[in-house]
Amino acid sequence: MEFFGEVKIDWLGKKWYFLAFSLIFSVGGLLSLFFWHGLPLDVDFRGGTVVRVKFTDAPDIGDLRAAAQRAGLKDAPVVTYGPPANHEVIITLPEKRSGESALDAGRASIVSTLTENYSKTGKQNLGTGKIDLDNVGRGQLADWLAQKDPEHLGQGDNATQRYTQQANAVLNYKDNEHSGLIGSIDDLSGVVDPAILNVLKQDAYLSGFTVRNVEIVGPQVGAQLRHQALYATLYSLAGMLVYLWFRFELIYGVAAVVAVFHDTLITIGFFSIFDKEISLTVIAAILTLIGYSMNDTIVVFDRIRENLRMTRREPLGQLVNRSINQTLSRTVLTSGLTFLTVLSLYIFGGEVLRGFSFALVIGILIGTYSSIAIASPMLVAYQDWRMQRGKSAALPAGRRSTKV
């Protein structure tokens, strides 16, 4: 399908504009990496404790970050999570330990920080002996009810069993019916006995937030994942270089790998400039982009090779321009439709897929651009370099493919 008619764009005539564009974004990304935000790694790579917190009302991210700072959690990123209507955030702690004790410590640290520095209700009830129904554990609530003994059961197994059952009823209702939070203690009417409901109204409160989940990535695991991500990227580039060397010629492989490295550098630079964390899903997106950009470059190279076989007298610059124009319809159709897909994923995919889709959006644009503006001009630059050294000006057409 031809999207365009006969196209006669002088792509190589604009090579200096392309070079300036690439330099601006490459240098900008490097400056951000070395002097501004650095390489913003997700907890997958740097290790730490990830705490997911749900709020009754929409949380103020600025106030949450200020609360973390006041509590001494200076390296605790706070980001929204999931649909805005869920009122959930993720707080990452630079935890260096692992195990059950670290999970409990991370949870307790966040609850204490938010109670003292963010929740107005929690701050008002500090030191009063009241219990926070939003963050109480089952055993803790059962023991508290047994101590209050609102049904006057005294001590013994019957009392323990009774109050454990009532504590479970409260927390099951809260977790299963209200996703961990209830709007008012009055909502428990009909869930627990009236005597227990009365004592909850008097001596319990709702802080307005609850810890939904706590996860830990150890520092050693994070370092191992960093190394594996780097090796995966380098091995993929090396493998593609060898393939193109065998399939075409070495210069084609070098040009394609330089273009893909250019794409990867700019994509990572955008993550640094916008201070977006690089996670395992982002690495998966970058590896996907390497393959996508390489495929687009190979299509252009294959057309250049075919045109080289058909004519040897046409100047290489004109031949490369003609080859790019001949594949332009295919490039616009495939890249355009893929871009619309990943753009929809970025807009509607939610926070979990935001990093993955952001890498795809930037990478597809830059990958398509580099196939035309970086890889192809390198072939002409290689020919010019050979001419300056007094060698043959002919660009190798590569090995002829065998079609089955």
Image (cartoon, grey):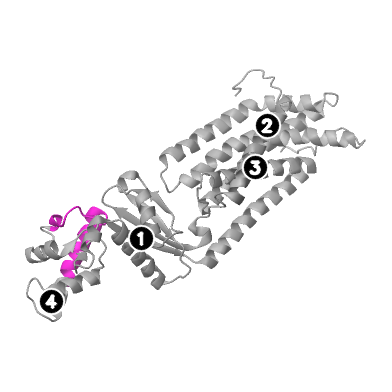
Q: Find residue 350 and report its horizontal and vertical position in percent.
A: 41, 44
Identify the amino acid type marked 4: Ala
SS under mark 3: helix
Whether residue 52 appears in magenta in the rendering, the answer is no
Disc with the residue nearer the chain's start (4 vs 1) = 4
Q: Is residue 183 magenta?
A: yes
Rounded to the nearest angstrom, the CA distance separating label 3 from label 4 is: 70 Å
Please indicate whether residue 273 sits to the left or right of residue 19 in the image: left
Provide the residue span drawn in magenta: 164-188
Residue position marked by numbered label 4 in the rendering: 159
Looking at the magenta stretch, what is its main secondary structure? Answer: helix
- Where residue 352 sits in the image (x, y, percent)? 43, 49
Residue picked out by circle 1: 213
Going by the numbered disc 2, the residue's amino acid type is Phe
Query: Which residue is identified by label 3?
Result: 27
Q: Which mark is residue 18?
A: 2
Residue 229: image quadrant is: bottom right
Residue at 31% of width from left, 58% of height from top?
117
- Which quadrant holds residue 198? bottom left
Q: Of tags 4 and 2, which is closer to the observer?
A: 2
Q: Is residue 275 above or below residue 399?
A: below
How far apart in space, not on screen, are marks 2 and 3 (Cα)? 14 Å
Find the distance from the CA under tag 2 to the CA under tag 1: 47 Å
Q: Position of residue 384 (x, y in %)?
A: 84, 33
Outermost residue, top side: 6
Q: Which mark is residue 84?
A: none
Whether residue 73 sits left or right of residue 297 in the image: it is left
Instruction: State which quarter of the image contains the C terminus.
Output: top right
Query: Circle 4 sits in a helix, a strand or a loop, which is it?
Result: helix
Query: Can I make out residue 131 in this image?
Result: yes
